[in-house]
Image: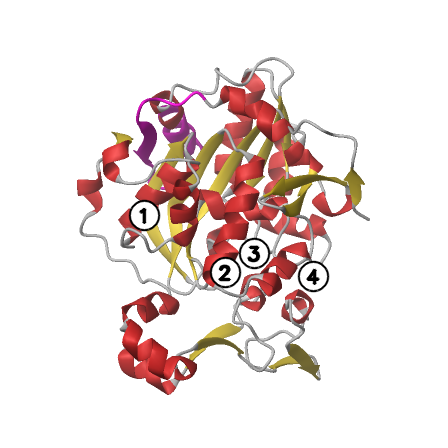
Amino acid sequence: MLKLNTKQTITTAMERDKFNTRDKLSVVSIVKCQSYDQKMVDKAIEQSLENINGLDPFIQEGTRVHIKPNLLTAKSPEKCATTHPTIVRTIIKHVQELGGIVTIGDSPSGISRPIEEYWQITGMAKVALETGAKLVRFEKKTVVERKVNGSSYFIADAIANADVVINICKLKTHNLTLFTGAIKNMFGSIPGFKKSEYHKQAPNVKDFSRIIVDIFSVTSPQLNIMDAIEVMEGNGPSAGKVKHLGLIFTSKDAVALDSIAAKIMGFEDGEILTTEEAYRRGLGEKGIDNIKLKGCSLGEFQDLQFVLPSNHYLNFIPVSVVKILGKLLWVRPKPDEFRCERCGACIATCPTQAMIPSDGFPIIDYNRCINCFCCDEACPHDAIDQKMSWLVKKFL
């Protein structure tokens, strides 16, 4: 049962801001790393931290450090839906060498099974055992209320009360927000099914992006590391296709990091609404003129070809056409009867109760479905496809 800490009046996130001493230009490090071999990852992370002046400015003996990986779903690391454990292991080592006390935690999309299974399958349990870092269960701990623009958000206390938060995200496409990186990863600071409720409250991607940025703004990660060795393209963030990129991004500025990573993926300026909203609020920089790159240059990646989410291509349909034919332009989730294992994860996660079990198989009531694709995120079997209207298919 979640408990609310009502006594805390000064937010740890605000206190952490004193560590956020920014350079004149936001620095984003891009370092090549061709595999998850531990020695190779160690070397790449070492170089990444050097490029941004290391961890020393904000980690000392006794500093409470929470590492926030992406543990979206109960899938093994090679499926590319979650942060790879080798990167988490390396960062823990660096923090502990400086005397930091480390916890690891995230709240997956829905909780369809015990959290210990997520830890085991994603490799986090092994990392914790080897390093002595403590895995924390967000769902059975105290939460701390944070208010942004009149809205209340209940943040896991492991994050809210940490001295330093290190955000280790995974570079993936996303079939709602188009892209998921450092900003979106902090959405997992909200325990349990409340995340699905936010989808219900904000079915429009623009409104949902504002909620994501609200949460990012009050969780204040000091360091953002993006696992981009193997990334996900297509209809991510759970069931897309694995693509080798061979990079690790690092920055103290999550907005700058996301801006550069999205550009490498092929997104146009202004397409990623979480980046736009965070920049508008002054939470970081965007655009190559305001960002200093260290390591690799953007020119090295200009010939990359990424498969972007189907929803991305809806942006190219003229506004005049959308106004006239809007109801005929849609992309919806569709369960696959043969891949479905009848586990019920998608049904439990659906924020509008639009999925009805029929002998265990989910039948979708599209009058209630808001196309948030929470079902796709939660499905551990890649059994949710995208169904397009005939008109969308014609445009594509």
Picture quadrant where residue 369 is located = bottom right
**Disc assigned to residue 245:** 1
Closer to the camera in the image, 94 or 266: 266
Going from the N terminus, do you reach mark 1 or mark 3 first? 3
Instruction: Give how far across and how far down residue 194 sits, in percent.
Output: 67, 55
Separation (CA) of disc 4 from disc 3 = 13 Å
Picture quadrant where residue 134 is located = top right
Going from the N terminus, do you reach mark 2 or mark 3 first? 3
Crowd band around label 1 with a 10 angstrom C-alpha radius: few (<14), some (14–19), many (20+): many
Type of the residue with mark 1: Leu
Going from the N terminus, do you reach mark 4 or mark 3 first? 3
Instruction: Give how far across and how far down residue 308 sits, in percent.
Output: 33, 62
Instruction: State yes or no: discs 1 and 2 in contact (Cβ < 8 Å).
Output: no
Q: Which residue is mark 2?
A: 238
Q: How is the image coloured?
A: secondary structure
Separation (CA) of disc 2 from disc 3 = 9 Å
Q: Which residues are magenta?
A: 21-47
Asked if residue 32 lies in the magenta stretch, the reply is yes
Closer to the camera in the image, 247 or 292: 292
Q: Which residue is mark 4?
A: 112
Going from the N terminus, do you reach mark 1 or mark 2 first? 2
Crowd band around label 2 with a 10 angstrom C-alpha radius: few (<14), some (14–19), many (20+): many
